[in-house]
């Protein structure tokens, strides 16, 4: 019996643990067996190569990490030519994260990605908080999210995950718009927005000023958003935000998530996804439960 079996839309997984886009490299295979991951999510790809934002673009805060990488990547053509080969030796389902500046560019990218049989699904990044023109304008408008999702859904039968931004007034309305458009699952949350300043000099710690904020401090925020969205929609959720151990995962499962992405913790604990999988296996064996027994089963709320 596989107590950790999980599912997102059209995809089945041996376990519910994957990695957050932009926090993972295929080179982690030197640390643990990547094939043990439930799935692999790549760094976000864009239509053209991007050099990313100027440095400094990372800063560790008292309770998390600020990042302003700016989606540095080789662009979709180079990724399909050579980058995707880096994942060819792994058996875990491969999910490609991608973003663009217009709806037409999103559609053109998906059509190119569809030519690769190695790809099992897509994480559509409509919510990157630190890149001009890519993502953020899409992720804050329900009508735009619905239009984009509707057009993408017509182009693929693979898993279509829409990644939502927490930097909105009402994340539920955005989630419903994605569901109505044909999304088969949702990912939430992307990073919050944050800032850090050297108190002795007044200089910004990040060259661009405002950055994406992730880490343990955002877990309660992510948890309540997952809970609200899970109650409002009928498709699975890939949750992320402050996950450092298996207990964090259990919270998200009870809130309604079916899959968990481990992100910032990998910078300090590169093998954290692997350790979480082992701890979840032990937990469910000891409790004589399956993962499916607890998803969305939080109680004590009036």
Image (tube, rainbow, N blue to C red):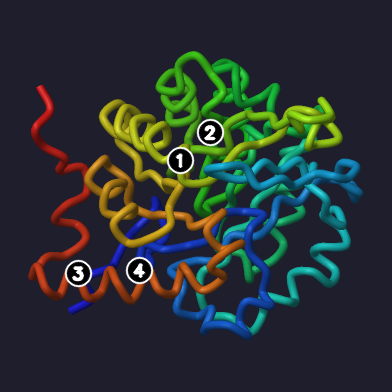
Q: Residue under label 1, please give it.
A: 186
Residue 35, compared with residue 151, is above or below; it is below
Residue 260 location (% of width, % of height):
41, 54
Label located before the other in sequence (1 or 2)? 2
- Between the residue at mark 1 and the residue at mark 3, the CA separation in whole angstroms equals 26 Å
Label located before the other in sequence (4 or 1)? 4
Q: Residue under label 2, please give it.
A: 164
Is 63 or 7 nearer to us in this picture?
63
Under tag 1, what secondary structure? Answer: strand
Cβ atoms under marks 1 and 2 closer than 8 Å = yes
Q: Residue under label 3, please give it.
A: 283
Residue 47 location (% of width, % of height):
84, 45
Q: Residue under label 4, please give it.
A: 15
Under tag 3, what secondary structure? Answer: helix
Mark 3 closeness class: few <14, some 14–19, many ≥20 residues within 10 Å: some
Taking the image as shown, residue 75 lies to the left or right of residue 148, namely right
Q: Quadrant of residue 139?
A: top right
- Between the residue at mark 4 and the residue at mark 3, the CA separation in whole angstroms equals 13 Å
In this view, the mark in front (3 or 2) = 3
Residue at x-position 58% and y-position 60%:
41
């Amino acid at each position: 019996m596989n107590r950790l079996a999980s599912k997102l839309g059209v995809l089945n997984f041996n376990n519910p643990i994957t990695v957050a886009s932009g926090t993972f490299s295929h080179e982690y295979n030197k640390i643990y067996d990547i094939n043990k991951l439930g799935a692999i999510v790549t760094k976000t790809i864009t239509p053209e190569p991007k050099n990313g934002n100027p440095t400094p673009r990372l800063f560790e805060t008292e309770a998390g990490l600020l990042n302003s990488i700016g989606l540095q990547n080789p662009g979709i053509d180079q990724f399909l030519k050579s980058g995707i080969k880096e994942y060819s030796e792994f058996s875990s389902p491969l999910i490609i994260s991608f973003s663009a500046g217009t709806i037409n560019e999103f559609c053109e990218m998906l059509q190119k990605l569809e030519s690769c049989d190695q790809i099992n699904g897509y994480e559509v990044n409509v919510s990157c908080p630190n890149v001009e023109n890519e993502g953020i304008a899409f992720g804050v408008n329900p009508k735009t999210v619905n239009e984009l999702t509707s057009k993408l859904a017509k182009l693929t039968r693979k898993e279509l995950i829409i990644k939502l931004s927490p930097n909105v007034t009402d994340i539920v309305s955005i989630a419903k718009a994605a569901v109505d458009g044909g999304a088969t699952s949702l990912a939430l949350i992307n990073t919050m927005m944050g800032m850090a300043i050297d108190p002795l000099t007044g200089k910004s710690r990040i060259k661009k000023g405002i950055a994406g904020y992730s880490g343990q401090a955002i877990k309660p925020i992510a948890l309540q958003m997952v809970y609200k969205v899970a109650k409002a929609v009928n498709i699975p959720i890939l949750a992320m935000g402050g996950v450092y151990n298996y207990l964090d995962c259990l919270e998200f499962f009870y809130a309604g998530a079916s899959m968990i992405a481990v992100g910032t913790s990998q910078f300090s604990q590169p093998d954290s996804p692997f350790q979480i999988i082992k701890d979840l296996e032990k937990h469910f064996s000891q409790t004589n439960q399956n993962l499916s027994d607890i998803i969305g089963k939080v109680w004590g709320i009036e």
